[in-house]
Image: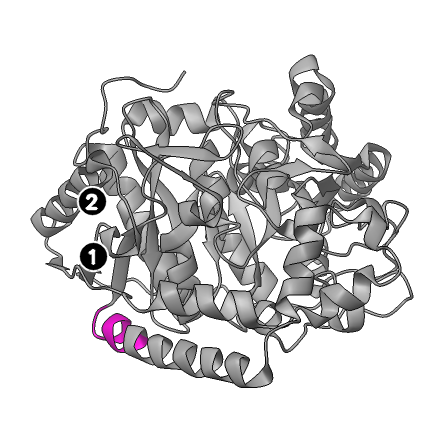
Amino acid sequence: MSPSLLSSINAGYQDATALAEAVQAGALTATDVVAAARKRASSEKGHALNAFITEDWDGAAAAAASLDARRAAGEPLGPLAGVPFSVKDVIAVAGLPVTAASLAFAGTTATTTAPAVQRLLDADAILIGKTNCPEFAFGVTCDSPLNGRTGNPRFPAATPGGSSGGEAASIAAGISALGVGTDFGGSLRWPAQCVGIVALRPGIGALPGEGQVPGLGGNFGSEGVLPAVSPGMQGSFQTIGPLARSVRDLQVAYRVMSGVEADAGTGQSAAFRVGWSDGRVFGPVRSEVSALMGRLAAALAAAGHAVEQQPDLLAECLPAYNRLRALDPMLDHAAAVAGKEDSVSGPNLETIRESLRASSADTGLAWAAAESARRQALRQINAVDVVLLPVAGGPAADVEGVLDIDGRQLQGWEVMGPCRAVTLTGCPVVSLPVGLSAEGLPLSVQVIAPPGGELTALAFAELLEALVLEHSVKPAGDRTAS
């Protein structure tokens, strides 16, 4: 990525770390920070973005005033003091709607709060609202039958991605400084690329997963019971995670949301062992993406890291993921929509019903194949410190979800093949923009670490962020983002 792209990501907006430091030092009040975010959200551009399903500016203002009073009284403030943040609509927050962007749950209000969200509140971050996503978070764009389409604030001809598209759009527009989304097959990593920000998909079990809807038995958090994570494929592999404007923001958010102590180490090493591929094993890849990955590898080698190209990285993971995704019964979704089928979009209702038709024998075989692919992938990942793959075979798709790969049109889940493959490993992964496409759209890389290596992935991503900013990796095209 060029310096011009990095600077345009923030577009004059401070990252969450800088905002918290300013509030803690008294250089800014939390009230002023929230007011600035509200002004952007209420502008004509903010309204047209359609990133939010609900906003709670009165609650945010009250929380900011309380925070400012505490500082005036000499009380210590949390590590995210005054940082405006938002939460994806498939995560429960008490007192706010939790609809999963479906007409079937249009009137649902959560009475419980996901633990990962509560930890941000306890760290003095300020909640400003809930953001849009596709129905049940099924989609590579951010189009909702309940709330409509969310736009991309930086690249209007492109989608902000799905399914955490509302979160990504709000951060890129300078409204939220931090976002909380979910990721099953790339729903954090892909939107982050589409708008040019960063995201962390934590490894399985690294963050508390309770509070995602629908939870066990179809629970939507409206009965006073926290939605528990289901034992099926989605419950096993979907994770809550942060989106932000900088890798250092992801580090702070991860420590807060996971409970990892600040002095637990950084995962940094003097030189990293890096395996990489351009992702061609998962499907079509633009030539400019392959070239960018090659330049990135060369820059890392020149900086003293041990870099090896491995074209077959995670080769078996995508077909295994796709097979299991089609056959694993979506029992919790079926329970949630029972009696409300007429209010669910036809394609999503058929997806749920189709998943219930598989035999237990076929599902068992799919799980066995997935475990075999995962073990093979982990042998490759554990042999190095980090693995690098592109987020997708090209940049953001258009607003209809169509992505051109050197003349070939991809759409739907095909677009997210590299992300889906990485999901099956269960490993932590950072999505980080490292270049520009010929159209001037961000191109991002997945930084994958072995299980338990969230801090390693974040440390390497920070190193990569600095390396790219300096000069080593040039944009894929000549155009720069405005």
- The amino acid pointed to by label 1 is Trp
Q: Mark 1 and 2 residues: CB-CB less than 8 Å, in contact?
A: yes
| Residue corresponding to mark 2 | 293
Q: Give the residue displayed 75% in from the left and 31% down from the top.
A: 31
**Which amino acid is tagged 2?**
Met
Is 458 situated above or below 126? below
Residue 417: in magenta span: no
Q: Residues within 10 Å of mark 1 (few under 14, many from 20)?
A: many
Q: Residue at x 53, y 33 (%)?
A: 160
Span highlighted in magenta in the image: 378-384
208 horizontally vs 405: left or right: right
Tell me residue 67's x, y (percent). Answer: 76, 43
Quadrant showing the N terminus: top left
Question: Which residue is more in the foreground, 22 or 153?
Answer: 153
417 w.r.t. 405: above or below: below
Q: Which residue is mark 1?
A: 276
Residue 121 x %, y %: 72, 53
Tag 2's secondary structure?
Answer: helix
Assign the C terminus to one quadrant of the image.
top left
The front one of 5 and 216 is: 216
